[in-house]
Image: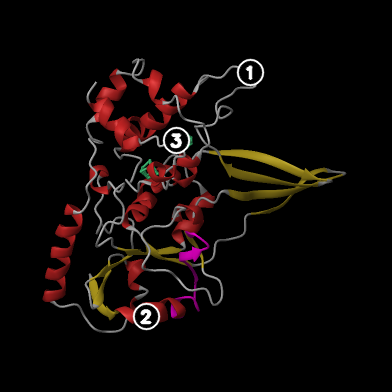
Amino acid sequence: MEKRLIKKDALTGIIGKIAQEAVVFAPVKVEDNVLFKALEKGEEPFLTYANSKNAPKNHFFPRSEVMLRYTRTAKGVEFAGGQKEAEATVLFGVRPCDARSFVLLDLLFDQEKYKDPYYIDKRQKATIVALACVHPPYATCFCTSVDGHPLSADGADVLLTDLGEEFLAEFVTPKGEKLLKYFGDVKADAAAEAKKEAVAEQAAKEIKSHIPAREVKPIMDANFDSPFWNTIHQKCIACGTCTYLCPTCHCFDITDEMKRDDGRRLRNWDSCMYPMFTKETSGHNPRPTQRERWRQRAMHKFSYYPENFNAIACVGCGRCVMYCPVNLDIRKIVTDISKL
Ligand code: SF4
Ligand code: SF4
């Protein structure tokens, strides 16, 4: 694996050069928020950020995307074009929890029996430059409980670690090595690698939030009808914030829109927290209350995904904990279930 050392003030210049050849997504300060978005001309990336409010998964799985267009003609409905091909992109400064979310989404969108061309095209043309959390930013971070680490390179093509005076850049995949030319030629020495090991150990110690995520599947499965589910959802207002900010949530709905004779088929995010999500045409709803919906959200992440893919569908980013307007905390729910 190639490793380079780069001066801290060189990062912005590197991003500028990459932007001449690819669309660069990076964290940007927008009013009071930090958003992960495509850099516009003259826009400065904000690389000393904690984490972005939105998850970088939005690039691969946008909130709304056109799948195909069609036109109604005298001869019938004619296909008028599909989604345009994805451009080469570099997602720069992705936090390790969010980089891991791509690995989890790949399991679903790019599996042997089911391939999602909309997701796969964007994913294959993207290079991920992750930025290690040398000091995990929030009390709500719990990546180490869900198979992650603040310095994990899972899902990344390049991992940048702040070593104080400079960054260590590790080119972990062949895709990442294509960016080598931008990072200079100062090879990392053994001292830099030892420093990184020490940083990794310290960063993991700074994660203060821990949950028994790997232990709860059999307990959840055995307690599907438990009275436990009767109360936890009661203050949930079904706003969907937890699912829309989550880097691993991936539910969607498909709708058709027509304007005169022109139509388009859209894929839009949906949420298991919404009452209409499972409502059937007959009027029957198999998840009639927030009780069943919250149980679904918890079990999808900690029981069904492990069963289907041997992976927990949560990366411990803490967004759902931070932004839930009524302070529902998935960490507490998982911990309480483990005691049933
Ligand atoms: S469930 Fe919450 S903590 Fe886990 S990945 Fe989603 S938003 Fe982050
Ligand atoms: S963010 Fe909180 S209130 Fe909103 S749907 Fe999720 S759990 Fe319910």
Q: Nearer the viewer, mark 2 or mark 3?
A: 3
Whole-Å distance between the Cαs marked 1 and 2?
Answer: 58 Å
* Residue at position x 24%, y 83% in the image: 186
Whole-Å distance between the Cαs marked 2 and 3?
Answer: 45 Å
Which residue is identified by label 2? 182
Q: Residues within 10 Å of mark 1 (few under 14, many from 20)?
A: few
- The mark that comes first in sequence, 2 or 3, is 2
Q: Nearer the viewer, residue 162 or 20?
A: 162
Q: Quadrant of the N terminus?
A: bottom left
* Residue at position x 33%, y 77% in the image: 180
Residue 148 spot, x, y in % from top left: 26, 49
Relative side of 188 to 78, left or right: left
Q: Nearer the viewer, mark 1 or mark 3?
A: 3
Q: Residue furthest bottom?
A: 185
Task: Answer yes or no: disc 1 within 8 Å of ligand 2.
Answer: no
Q: Which residues are magenta?
A: 17-33
Q: Are marks 2 and 3 in contact (CB under 8 Å)?
A: no
Which residue is identified by label 1? 283
